[in-house]
Every structure is written in C-alpha cells, then in structure tokens.
Image: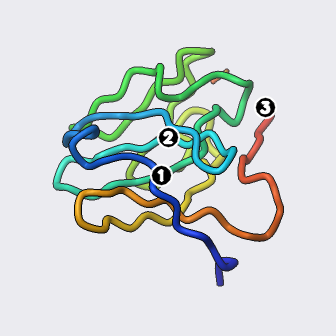
Amino acid sequence: MSSPARFVNAASVDDLWEGDLLDVEVDGEQVLLAHLDGGEIKAYQGMCPHQEVLLADGEWDPDTNVLVCPGHRWEFDLATGKGLNPTGCQLYEFDVRVVSDEIRVGIPTDGQRHHNRFQT
Ligand code: FES
C-alpha cells in the first residue's frame, strides 16, 4: 500500500498536450509529467536515477513510450517507469489526479525523498 499523499496542483491540462513532457517542481520535488498517447498522464521523478539530469530534456517517442535520457542515453518506458537500458532500475512514480483542467500530483507525506537512484 502506498503512503498517504497530499495532492498538489502541478500544471494545467492545457500545458501538457498528448505526447508532451513537462518538468515541474511540486512541493520541492522535481517531477516529470508525461501525457501518454491515449490520454493517461503519468508523473515520475524528474531527475534521472543515474545522475542529476532532467529527464524532461530527453528525447521521448510517444509511439513507443521510450524516453532517452540526455545524460548518458539510458532508456525508460514512460508507460511503466521501468528502465529498458539498463534494466533493473525503476523511476519513482507519483499518483496523479486530474480535477477539471488541473493535473494534481500526489506527494507522499512520509518525509522521504521520492527519487530512486541506480548505479550500474
Ligand atoms: S544522467 Fe541519465 S543516463 Fe546518465
């Protein structure tokens, strides 16, 4: 079970068209928003699990959901947050609610840092 979260307005749906990425700061957390083909909106940690590089600056193909980090070209599936290359890493995923035209991100109230790291 995930820990309790506080849902915070992160962006307007108008700022994130289908197939777009957006880098936002929510309650001090760097968050990557992705609007998947088909309409689902995902929220993941904004920084790469490898080093402090913004994932939103990467190349994303909404047809395959593959995001390539601009740092060292690690690849992630933005439908699941799973690392594809290298495998074994996983982006931290936040809950998302869309209320009218607001995208709200669930920030857990556990006092932890919500950013998975991974070293090869
Ligand atoms: S910082 Fe993302 S792959 Fe190295």
Q: CA distance from mark 1 to mark 3?
A: 24 Å
| Label 1: few (<14), some (14–19) or many (≥20) C-alpha neighbours in 10 Å | many
- Left or right, 71 with respect to 96, comes to right
Q: Quadrant of residue 53?
A: top right
Question: Which residue occupies 24% across, 57% down?
Answer: 101
Question: Which residue occupies 21% across, 43% down?
Answer: 14
Percent position of residue 46, x then y: 58, 37
| Label 2: few (<14), some (14–19) or many (≥20) C-alpha neighbours in 10 Å | many
Provide the residue designation for mark 3: 120
Amino acid on which the number 2 mark rests in the picture: Leu
Amino acid on which the number 3 mark rests in the picture: Thr
In the image as oriented, which residue stretches furthest toward the bottom? Answer: 1
Provide the residue designation for mark 1: 43
- Can you tell which mark lies on residue 32? 2
Percent position of residue 60, x then y: 35, 28
Q: Quadrant of ligand 1?
A: top right
Question: Which residue occupies 58% across, 47% down?
Answer: 26
Which mark is in front, 3 or 2? Answer: 2
| Label 3: few (<14), some (14–19) or many (≥20) C-alpha neighbours in 10 Å | few
Question: Which residue occupies 19% across, 42% down?
Answer: 18
Q: Earlier in the sequence, mark 3 or mark 2?
A: 2
Q: Earlier in the sequence, mark 1 or mark 3?
A: 1
Amino acid on which the number 1 mark rests in the picture: Ala
